[in-house]
Amino acid sequence: MKIIPLSEGSFTVDKTKVFVPFQKGVDELQQRPVGSLLVEIQPFAVITSKDILLFDTGLGFHTDNGVMQLHQNLVDNNIDPSSVTKILMSHLHKDHAGGIQNNKPGGLSAELSFQNAVYYVNRNEFAFASENKTSSYIQEDFALLQHSDRLQLLDDTGILDDYIFYEMTGAHSPYHTVFWIKENDEVVFFGGDVAPQLQQMKNKFIAKYDYDGRKSMELRMQWWEQAQQQHWKILFYHDIKTPTVFL
């Protein structure tokens, strides 16, 4: 399997849940509001023998030329966005779901960003996100999926095409889902925001921003042990230094 990080850049975010661009080596974290977190926004493409998979969709920002940053990142890696076949969503917070649809600048009509792909979302997560308008859930980011035949609602556990395994863990959000891709003795693991950064895997850490911080910590400890024993490749959505670890 080929793994391609698709970073939209580094950002700080505080209690306002506004993502402010951060230039490493130029900006100073200490000059941002107290409590600001420094994170990468980093979807991943994974190319398998069957699919071009996309894990989460970023913030949905556009370049100065009006092109979706996520589309441009794919093109820069020789991937036609129209060739993406499956989009695996961990949850629908705006920094993960902002690129589900292309809300074009200039008042142009929005459209699904990946019209040839199937979007996979936990059914309870989709219902919860659709009913709870908060600073984290922005319904306009995924409104076009509501009645689309490109949406596939997932149960809490299951297998797609005999090689994509998923499990609803909750922990970060009430119905957060994680994924394992198992092909040719390789295991790629995407833990979304339950396992967002390498350092959190190595240390006991309870995050105040999690729905259930203790459960998140316990799951990270469990996964880190399994990953070392089973030689997983782990994808870290919010790690500014280490997008992937191969164990």
Image (tube, rainbow, N blue to C red):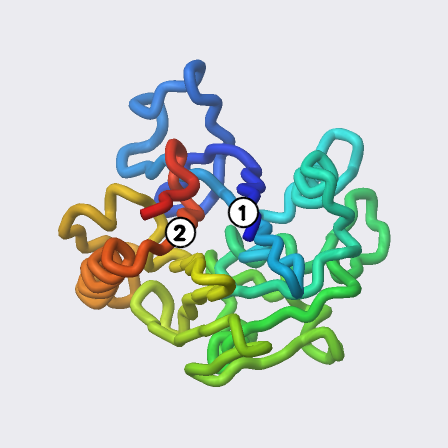
Given residues 8 and 139, the one toward you in this image is 8
Name which residue lies at 33% across and 45% down: 197
Residue that numbered label 2 is attached to: 233
Residue 201 x %, y %: 24, 50
Q: Secondary structure at mark 1?
A: strand
Which amino acid, mark 2?
Answer: Lys
Which amino acid, mark 1?
Answer: Ile
Residue that numbered label 1 is attached to: 3
Task: Determine if residue 58 is in view.
Answer: no
Name which residue lies at 59% across and 50% down: 45
Residue 87 x %, y %: 62, 63
Residue 39 x %, y %: 40, 39
Given residues 226 and 172, the one toward you in this image is 226
Residue 142 x %, y %: 64, 65
Given residues 22 and 232, the one toward you in this image is 232
Residue projecting furthest to the left: 204
